[in-house]
Image: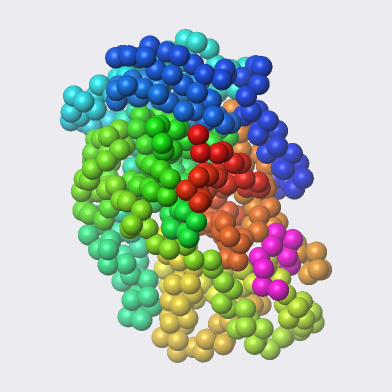
Amino acid sequence: MTARKKPLLPGVAGLVLILILGILHLPSAVGPPAFLSLHGPEGKITLYAVGPAQWRVEAGSPQDQAFAEGVLDGLDAAPLLILRRAAAYGQLEALVGPQAKEADAWARERLAPVIARAWEALDAETRSRLEAYAAGVNTAWRMGIPMIRRLPSDPLARPWEPRDSLAVAVGLALAHPGWMEAEIAAALRRLPPAPRAALEDPRWSSATPAPDVARREAAWRAWAAVGVAPELGLFRTCQEDTGIRLHAMAAPVFPLPWRLIWVDDGVRLRWPGIPGALARIRQAEGAQLEPKPGPGDVLDALGELSVRVVRESGESPLWAWRGKDAWPRCAPPATPDREALLALTPEGWLQRRVHGMLARWDGQLDAKSPSALVYEVWRWELIRTALGPAVGEENLRRLLARRPAERLRAAAQALWEAQGNEVRELKAMAYRRALAEIGRRYGDLHTIWEWGKAHAAPVRILGWPIRAEIPLGGDESAPWPTPVDPVRPFATAFWPALTVQRESQVILKIAPTPVWWRWP
């Protein structure tokens, strides 16, 4: 496991922080009004507040809709707009510090011509919507920002321009997994046939390697950490008996990196900085923008991506809108390796005591559970021990980001056997390493270990020097599993999960507690 810094606001303090943030998003005497009436480019626009930072939009044309979205983003998501624009123009270091220095150098060198070419290639209709959106943002900024928001200083210090939305779309483009899949394919060629077959994904066989992959990946990680880019793949979605579930994958930042708005009889999930949506959900129906396997550099297709987002439909060589029928069924995960762990022969006093604790474990991955911590770290060490030396640390992180953990463990065991070793030896070695790592971090008293101490969501507020870590359970047995950060193996990325249940209720799940909005 990689080293982790001590959080500034752990445990209860982190929970208090989330509650404070919830209060800040509630309508109040100093907050936004219950509704706004505006004149757009082509007609009247009415915005109704229907929940914390959520609005229902009534607009008569696509240009008016884009103008309304610009107003809302300018009022409620100004920090995100400033950060996302600064990142694409290589000015992020001025806002978040030296951790963005390398990303800024790459952006200044690589992105200016990409944005210029994409703008020149846009059709007139898409340009007109971007212009309407920019007019909306600037209208909001002339109105002033609510006092409860603290904005970072804008290093560009200028109004929003239409092509700035294309700059924001670069962050979405980096979430296309094609460039990472090309690196994974190259790494898998070094493996024997059995483990290689377990990890290959033929859907991405046409993915093109990026010429600047190391710098691009560093930029993506820096951008994702502050809400400038989402996680790879954008969403995880599935169908339930009571409706549909959509996880919008992004880093833990406030204001939240995604936004919901209500239009007609449905909700649209947006990425502030560009008009349009990346997912639409109506009562028990849905569609979303998905990365599509194909050749070419996704940055060269920036204009195509922008059109797909702004128009909320269609298909291009690297992006496509998919309906709910293409989503898999939601399946609650289990703890399939528990019996294999218990079958190991304990070595030494610590393993004997931990084994007794595991025998009494109910299999639930609760945040307070010491057994859940042992189980998860052991399963990670199975992968790390066998696959790490074969593919390297960077490619192991990429595999963690793009392959289910079960496939990685199966491949690790197949590789171990192909090298002439016994799987039981791998499991025992991983057990020793797991307990040594846990003991080094949390001490040798196993009864005070907690899964949530390792599996925590780091949260930051843009523009404020505040960070917190929220302990979380889940991943396998919880109804709302959380993703594993490939850089810090047990720290979870913090992302909302939007659900439509019983065709009447939309639920936005945000750790540690959900927020409900009735269908307006």
Left or right of residue 39, residue 1 in this image: right
Tell me if residue 62 comes above or below residue 481 in the rendering. above
Q: Is residue 68 visible?
A: yes
> Of 196 and 39, which appears nearest the observer?
39
> What is the basis of the colouring in this image?
rainbow
Magenta-span inclusion, residue 397 = no
From this viewpoint, is residue 216 visible? no
At x 64%, y 87%, the residue is: 343
Q: Residue at x 66, y 55 (%)?
A: 472
Residue 278 position by quadrant: top left
**Prevailing SS of the magenta stretch:** loop
Q: Against 386, is 166 above or below?
A: above
Magenta part of the chain: 362-370
Residue 71, picture quadrant: top left
**In which quadrant is the N terminus drawn?**
bottom right
Question: Is 367 included in the stretch rendered in magenta?
Answer: yes
In the figure, is residue 208 to the left or right of 431? left
Q: Position of residue 443 (x, y in %)?
A: 78, 64
